[in-house]
Image: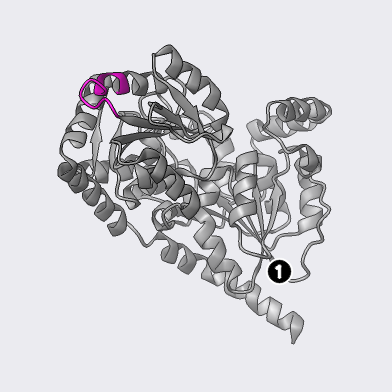
Amino acid sequence: MSGPLPAGLRMYRLLSAAARPLVPILLARRVKHGKEHRQRLSERRGENGITRPEDPLVWLHGASVGELASVLPLIDRISGRGINMLVTTGTVTSGGLAERRLPPGVIHQFVPIDIPRFVRRFFDHWRPDLALFVESDMWPNIMIEASARGIPMVLINARLSKNSFERWRRLPNSIAALLQRLDLCLAGSPPDAARLSELGASNVIVTGNLKIDVPPPPAEPVALAALHDAIAGRPVIAAASTHDGEETVILEAHTRLRRNFPDLLTLIAPRHPERGGGIAELAAAAGSTAAVRSRGELPKRTTQIYVADTVGELGLFYRLAPAVFIGGSLIRHGGQNPIEAAKLRCAIVHGPHIWNFAEIYAALDSAHGAELINDVDRLTAHFAAWLNDPDACARVAEAGHRVVENMAGGLDRTLASLDPYLMQLQLRQRGRHA
């Protein structure tokens, strides 16, 4: 797309350029709070110490852990075709996931801050031949620069909640000017496609949610065995990806449940692991004894709350708890991903605020593979019913598992849509080596 930028984007570019002197202060503050890698700050300024591969390069960007996890199978498939890949993310935890899970040879960098000079430096070095953006993490200066350099851009697993749609509609010319720069928009669901099209995206195709095609999260066998031994047959429930304000509800439900299940162990895995210590303090204030995984602790017979404040271990806890509350849903956050729990046959409960995964939750609820709760009374009642009747719990879990299995296929459809771009890069690569 060519032509003058809308006023909103022109103002953004001016303000972001003017903010460059403030970047050292911003980065120092983020390092202090554990939100940046001190040794890799140069990447956030677009500086790179890694040599670019000589052959064509596909660049994929996902904001954080959830986005990166959803596209790991796609990265495997693209890199498996012998195509060089650069993957960028924006968070420390996503960097850790990249280090553990990216295929050999795939380069990881932290995405540059969206300031024109940093962005130009990034593109001057990497010169990507194709840019893939995951879900909705589109930065204006990055997109404008990629467009100016003629780099094809594709939005994959694209999603846009109703709330985000309403916010984006306040700047219709600016968002349209960005979306129209995309060569292709691969939407996760028909509602996402409709909202993106209304905002100005063209060539929109519904390919399905890539998160459904991701394998269940792994569990390290030794760690799983150690937890099984520590729990030793106790009744267990879990709360996963919880946010501030939800743990108090979980702790109250735990207190009530212990009247009938005195040996109950409740696992709490916060969405942001750095909150683990604070959750242990909340548990103590509520009269419950807590152990904290990041401190190397295992639950004892006297432990009532186990705070699972580590990264990449949800697979452990979904294998231990037959029933789980999925967080981000009792507060106005939009809900966290229920797919992993469903794949590992957990019976799911969730709150009403689930717009981030509206289609999946609707399918789960309709099939009785998940249950909606609005307060601690209903949360306690569902957990109590499932603890009393493991067969009923297993039926809910199996229904949820069938739902996500039937919704699969997004990975193959995404690859089919990307295939013309990838084949062109492979032909160029073969031509270089002929």
Image-based side of 156 in relation to 262, left or right:
right
> Does residue 404 sit above or below 106 in this rendering?
above
| Main SS class of the magenta portion in the image | loop
Q: Which residues are magenta?
A: 254-263
Q: Residue 48: horizontal and vertical position, in percent?
A: 81, 51
Quadrant of the image occupied by residue 263: top left
Residue under label 1, please give it. Answer: 56
Q: Is 42 situated left or right of 155 in this image?
A: right
Task: Pick whichever, 320 or 103, lies toward us.
Answer: 320
Residue 15 lies in what quarter of the image?
A: top right
Residue plotted at (75% across, 83% down): 433
Q: Residue furthest bottom?
A: 434
Q: Position of residue 361 (x, y in %)?
A: 30, 41
Q: Is residue 367 visible?
A: no
Q: Position of residue 408 (x, y in %)?
A: 35, 59
Of residues 309 and 229, the one nearer the viewer is: 229
**Amino acid type at image mark 1:** Pro
